[in-house]
Image (cartoon, grey):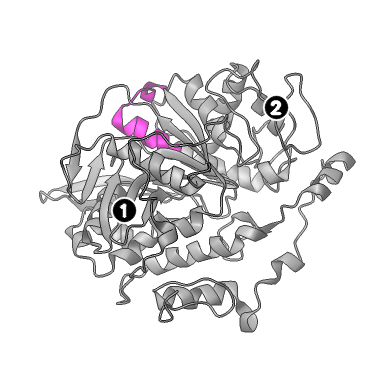
Amino acid sequence: MDNTTPSCPFCPFSDQDATFVAQHIEYCHPEGGAPPSFSHDIPSFDNVNQSPSLAAEEEESTEKYIDCPHGCGETVTTAELSTHLDLHIAEGIASDDSGTVQTSFNHDPSNDIPSDIDESQDYEVSRKHGKRGPYRDFTRGNTSKSVQPRNRSPVGKIGPDGAKRLGRSELGPHAHEKKMPPWLKKLLEKGSPTSKQTRITPDGRLARSTITENETDHLIPVIAKLCSADSSTSRVFLCSPQVRHICKLSREGGFCGYRNIQMLLSYITKSKAAGSESFPNGVPSILQLQELIEKAWDMGYNSSGRTETGGIKGTRKFIGTPEAQALFMSLKIPCDASSLSGAERISAHDALYMEVASYFRSKVPLENETKVFTTDLPPIYFQHQGHSMTIIGFEIRENGSANILVFDPMFKTSPAMSRLINSAAAGKAENPGKLLKAYRRETKYLQKFKMFELLKLSTAEPVDGYKSQ
């Protein structure tokens, strides 16, 4: 590693942005460098409905959960805490665009896509029936009679179809909760605050619109302009601008899976894609999605999910790719779910890069080398162990490394990004890398995971058009 790269004196973390490193130390190593003491004093999650057998099950689990000390309302494992706080730092840095610190990147060979692998050739990637992280099973349709055996499952209830009851390592700290707290249900029923906004359109007219606090539209064009202005970026491929960034409410907790489903539905409803007729009133709420998923199970789509989860309606249990797939298929929305893991010639994260790159490049003419392409492809539901996001693009850096670009429901849109919507200033930003940090997921983040799941919406008709920046 370059000795001039700012680094944390207490752990391997480093970044060219000295401010980012300083804030990492402040959040992750308070009190003279000692890491947060959460692992020494993990708060208990008492469930009044937890039986002795379930308590014994939890003793076997290696997962320890802690409420985010940043106050976002998320509950994460202690192993993921440092990464989670680093992303909060990126979110905070992007909130202030008045600084002058330039973000640059060193060439890390571990980030490179293998040069000996041609994108067009087949590669050895596991396409097993997907799981929640390395645990869940799902197939592409009615699984009531085709449940696959699970290699690792918690001790617990076994249903008539052979599905085993999952625990906290898969469903989160509230795995055995029968009902969410009344205050949380009221929060979800009320939804995010809305306001009216009047803005000047590019042609000089006044336009009035309703703004929902946890939803941000028109972000893809901003990201396209920032990538175009970032000298460290070589090529970028982006999904349809119709997708909306939807983040969690304050104190909401672990509803990332639902928020990602909402983001895919925001594309469907706005673009009038297949299935949009099922949502005449717009994107459904979390509580409505829970009902739709349970209805999908009733119809036989991935119905083992009911046994595995014990039911999700009115609870805070984590959901994943199987539930998203069941929902879309029950509504006749074409989709394809797959699982990617490493093989002899390629790591899991490189397989992910190649799959996502192939998805976006399939709609870009090979002879065109414009730096930034905005396609009209749907975004991708993206799951790894313990968390899910929405993939909105793929980025190749000048140093040969790659990133996926995501909307993460865990983090809100910064004021700095909001100010750039419908503005020409994005293409002239002094620090585009600083603003893009919250949307990039690099090899350093992805290489921690051995398996990824993707759920792609199938386009009803060939998508030929694209826009370039």
For residue 267: magenta?
A: yes
For the question of whether residue 190 can be seen, the reply is: no
Q: Which mark is first along the chain, 1 or 2? A: 2
| Residue 338 vertical position relative to residue 177 in the rendered view, above or below | above
Amino acid type indicated by mark 1:
Ile
Residue 31: percent from left, percent from top: 64, 82
Q: Residue at x 44, y 78 (%)?
A: 6
| Residue 80 vertical position relative to residue 1 in the rendered view, above or below | above
Q: Residue at x 29, y 77 (%)?
A: 100
For residue 142: magenta?
A: no
The residue carrying mark 2 is 149
User: How far is the residue under mark 2 from the one under mark 1?
Assistant: 39 Å
Amino acid type indicated by mark 2:
Pro
Could you say which is closer to the camera, residue 457 or residue 448? 448
The residue carrying mark 1 is 396
Range of the magenta residues? 262-278
Query: Residue 458 falls in which quadrant of the image?
Result: top left
Q: Residue at x 57, y 22 (%)?
A: 296
Q: Element type at marker 1?
A: strand
Residue 144: percent from left, percent from top: 64, 17
Q: Main secondary structure of the magenta part?
A: helix
